[in-house]
Image (spheres, rainbow, N blue to C red):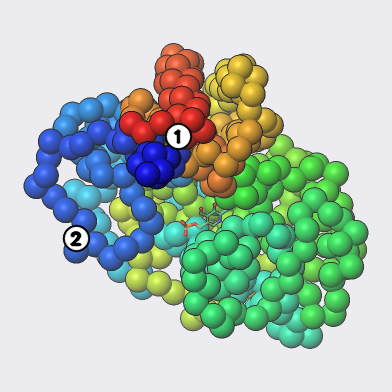
Amino acid sequence: MNLFSLRRSPPSLDDLVMDASLPSKDNSLSSEYLMPGIERPKQVFVRGQGSWLWDSDDRAYLDFSQGGGANSLGHSPSVLVNAITAQAQSLINPGFGLHNRGMLKLAERLCASTGSDQAYLLNTGSEACEAAIKLARKWGQQHRGGASRIIVANNGNHGRSLATMSASDSSTLANRFEPQLPGFSHVPFNDLPALHAAVDERTVAIMLEPIQSEAGVIPATAHYLKGVERLCRELGILLIFDEVQTGIGRCGTLLAEQSFGVTADIVVLGKGLGGGVPLAALLARGKACCFEPGEMTGTHHGNALMTAAGLSVLDTVQDKAFLKHVAEAGQHLREGLGRLAHRYGHGELRGQGLLWGLTLSDDSADAVVKAALYEGLLLNAPQPDCLRFTPALNVSNANIDEMLLRLARAFSRVRTAQLQCRKGIAV
Ligand code: PLP
């Protein structure tokens, strides 16, 4: 008899870390009727305050994802709650075909604070990126003989609608729902000669994220972005910045473009603008303002409730002291993560402000996210070897220190599981 065959097969890292997921006492809700989307942990979240979330078992979690950076002021901040409450009591939705105060004020405030000439308000980042594509194509019809091609960067992410999926790097998606939309040329990021070589008479614009978030928080170099801006001016094409992730103070300035000293013709905002409610914006400058009546519409575009939320976020973020806090807290987070990365032999730390990516020494990011959940910490992993940190922009140093303690415990938990895997020890 082969005694080895009696041994249990070695558990995988996921088995070991999954084993760490806590059973819920609340079995009253099930995901049976939910169409499959992304994989979600079992917990049901019921309450949030600042950097903390509570599940239905009243377990507390420190949230360093904040809905992928959408909750710019943390969970249920009073300014947002008060603004939404007051707006809901007076007017929720007069209808997209009518003006409301929030729509007009937010468009004006966004233009004044970003040096833009026109703003259009939408609901999601994908939708706003798609609107940017339409605006560039409209400009191409008017000013560049019908040119419509947009150059985008490899590994970029502009959303998951059909058009924005085509503009993004969708090579790792389970299903690309072919055929993709034509009209995009993909070039390596941070490679000016490749970008230059890709421009031809069909090109109307270049669309980039100043920091590629989903790719693992990969910043553009200032040299690259300045070169791209120059190229666009020289060749007479538009520069579009997708600031859905990087905008609204996330990088320590209202727009990330300011920190690079570059000005785009079109800027896309989303996520943090609504502070947790669905709100996005398309900003245009100078010659790029070329939409005419009838070319853009949507049932909830400029919705009064959402624009009230956006105004309260902008009021808070535009304060100089607030942006100074983002930069200082970002520095504290960077230093702490750097120390932890060194202690656990992990790799590079990339980002700015309060958007950071940590490269791990192996593809254990999903396992670390699961172990962190067990430790009461919410994180996400944009890549198999990368953790992303997008805390509330008003996060305290004490919360950052607590996060580092929990992350250290999660790293140790994964290390132990990896050792057990290697030794073939079942738990
Ligand atoms: N653009 C960027 C840079 C993003 O990070 C995202 C979302 O992660 C999107 C666009 C799409 O935004 P949404 O998910 O709101 O459609």
| Amino acid identity at mark 1 | Gly
- Mark in the foreground, 1 or 2: 1
The residue to which callout 2 is attached is: 32
In the picture, which quadrant includes the C terminus?
A: top left
Residue 346 left/right relative to 224: left
Give the percent coordinates (x, y) of residue 322.
Answer: 52, 26
Q: Residues within 10 Å of mark 2 (few under 14, many from 20)?
A: few
Nearest the viewer among 229 and 19 is 19
In the image, farthest residue toward the left: 28
SS for callout 2: loop
Disc 1 from disc 2: Cα separation: 34 Å
Instruction: Please name the residue that numbered disc 1 is placed on.
Output: 424
- Residue 424 vertical position relative to residue 238 in the rendered view, above or below: above
From where the camera sits, is residue 176 visible?
yes
353 over 7 or under it: above or below:
above
Residue occupying the point 79% across, 42% down: 221
Residue 269 screen position, x and y as percent: 54, 53
| Mark 2: amino acid | Glu
Q: Residue furthest bottom?
A: 145
